[in-house]
Image (cartoon, helix red, strand yellow):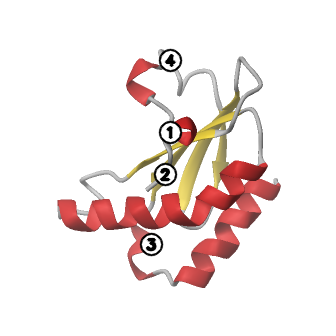
Amino acid sequence: MIPKIYKLKLRKEVDFFHNCERYYSRYFQIFYRHSNNNQNTKAVVVVPKKTVKLRVNRTKIKRQIYGLSLPLLRKSRGLDMVFVINKKIITAKKQELINDLTDVFSS
């Protein structure tokens, strides 16, 4: 899993989705904004129940995304990010996800 310092507590954030920018990727939609204090980049992964029915599979996808994005989160500073997962991620390969995540963090 991901350490607490990199986890965004989305329930405590008021109007996060109204005050952020959007980035569309092949496998997810990313909502991000610059953090008020210039600390570590924080992220949260949201897998809608409508997209992936079983809880076990939702948790598996979350762990994959957290695991792949942790090295990238350590390198970047001062962002709050929300990854909303697409249905296409079910058939995605690990290398495709890595390439997609590096594209997200590079732009």
- Dot 4 falls on a residue whose secondary structure is loop
Label 4 environment density (alpha carbons within 10 Å; few <14, some 14–19, many ≥20) = few
Compared with 34, 58 (above or below) is: below
Q: Are discs 1 and 3 less than 8 Å apart at CB? A: no
Q: Residue furthest right?
A: 106
Residue type at mark 1 is Lys
Q: Are discs 1 and 2 less than 8 Å apart at CB? A: yes
- Residue under label 3, please give it: 88
Q: Earlier in the sequence, mark 1 or mark 3?
A: 1
Residue type at mark 3 is Lys
> Distance from label 1 to label 4 (Cα)?
18 Å
Q: Nearer the viewer, residue 34 or 2?
A: 2
Q: Which of marks 4 and 3 is nearer the N terminus?
A: 4
Label 2 environment density (alpha carbons within 10 Å; few <14, some 14–19, many ≥20) = some
Labels 2, 4: front one: 2
> Distance from label 2 to label 4 (Cα)?
24 Å
- Residue under label 1, please give it: 7
Q: Residue 58 placed where, x, y %?
A: 29, 61
Horizontal side, residue 32 vs residue 75: left or right: left
- Residue under label 2, please give it: 2
Residue under the point 52% across and 64% down: 67
Which image quadrant is residue 18 in? top right
Compared with 55, 15 (above or below) is: above
Label 1 environment density (alpha carbons within 10 Å; few <14, some 14–19, many ≥20) = some
> Distance from label 1 to label 3 (Cα)?
24 Å
Q: Earlier in the sequence, mark 2 or mark 4?
A: 2
- Residue under label 4, please give it: 15
